[in-house]
Image (cartoon, rainbow, N blue to C red):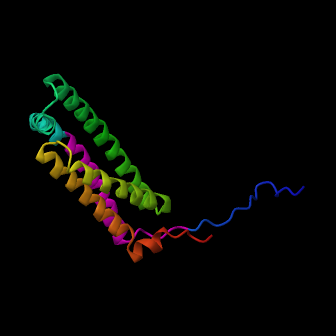
């Protein structure tokens, strides 16, 4: 069995990734904006609780007041949890995209696709108008990030670095 000479450990030279191009940095900024917008969306949802309750009552006139209240509380809890989780995911993906990790770019793109479906469904849900419009703001941040992540300069940055 071969053993290296003590004190002379063989290591391959570490190749460094070039600095992130402007397109990746713009995508990362859009992701940070999406994180902030997700957290601000929680505030929007909490400020429009009454309008959401009215929208639920109009959408489902056969519901009792208790059922409307329960539905409203479940939606608000979902908005808070979803907003916090979304902000964390935005920040994690931004960090790893800035490092050039291809899996983060793909994951962000897939999540954007799911967000597109969710946003379209959300437009037909009984919510306050401000909540619906704010969802579009968050979606636009995702669209911006995905467009910049898939530009030619970005794609070159995400290719594995040869050793």
Does the magenta segment cover residue 96?
no
Q: Residue at x 45, y 61 (%)?
A: 106
Does the magenta segment cover residue 27?
yes
Q: Nearer the viewer, residue 34 or 126?
A: 126
Q: Is residue 140 left or right of residue 8?
A: left
Q: Residue at x 27, y 53 (%)?
A: 34
Q: Main secondary structure of the magenta part?
A: helix
Q: Residue furthest right?
A: 1
Q: Residue at x 38, y 56 (%)?
A: 94
Up-down: is 106 above or below 126? below
Which of the image's four quarters has the N terminus? bottom right
Up-down: is 107 above or below 125? below
Q: Residue at x 24, y 60 (%)?
A: 140
Q: Is residue 141 left or right of residue 3?
A: left
Range drawn in magenta: 16-42
Q: Is residue 111 left or right of residue 38?
A: right
Q: Nearer the viewer, residue 105 or 15?
A: 105
Total tally of numbered discs in the picture: 0
Which of the image's four quarters has the C terminus? bottom right
Q: Residue furthest bottom?
A: 152
**Residue 77 percent across, percent down from the top left:** 26, 32
Up-down: is 80 above or below 87? above
Q: Residue furthest front?
A: 62
**Residue 131 percent across, percent down from the top left:** 16, 46
Q: Quadrant of residue 43?
A: top left
Q: Is residue 50 left or right of residue 24?
A: left
**Residue 120 percent across, percent down from the top left:** 25, 54
Q: Nearer the viewer, residue 138 or 66?
A: 66
Up-down: is 35 above or below 50? below
């Amino acid at each position: 069995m071969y053993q290296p000479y003590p004190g002379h450990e063989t290591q391959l030279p570490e190749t460094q990734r070039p600095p992130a191009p402007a397109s990746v940095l713009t995508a990362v900024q859009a992701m940070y904006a999406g994180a902030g917008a997700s957290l601000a969306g929680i505030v929007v949802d909490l400020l429009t609780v009454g309008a959401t309750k009215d929208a639920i009552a109009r959408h489902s006139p056969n519901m009792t007041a208790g059922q409307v209240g329960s539905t409203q509380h479940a939606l608000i809890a979902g908005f808070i949890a979803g907003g916090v989780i979304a902000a964390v995911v935005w920040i994690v993906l931004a960090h790893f995209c800035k490092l050039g990790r291809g899996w983060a770019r793909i994951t962000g793109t897939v999540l954007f696709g799911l967000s597109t479906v969710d946003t379209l469904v959300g437009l037909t849900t009984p919510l306050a108008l401000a909540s619906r419009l704010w969802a579009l703001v968050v979606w636009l941040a995702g669209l911006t990030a995905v467009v910049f992540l898939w530009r030619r300069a970005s794609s070159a940055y995400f290719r594995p670095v040869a050793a």
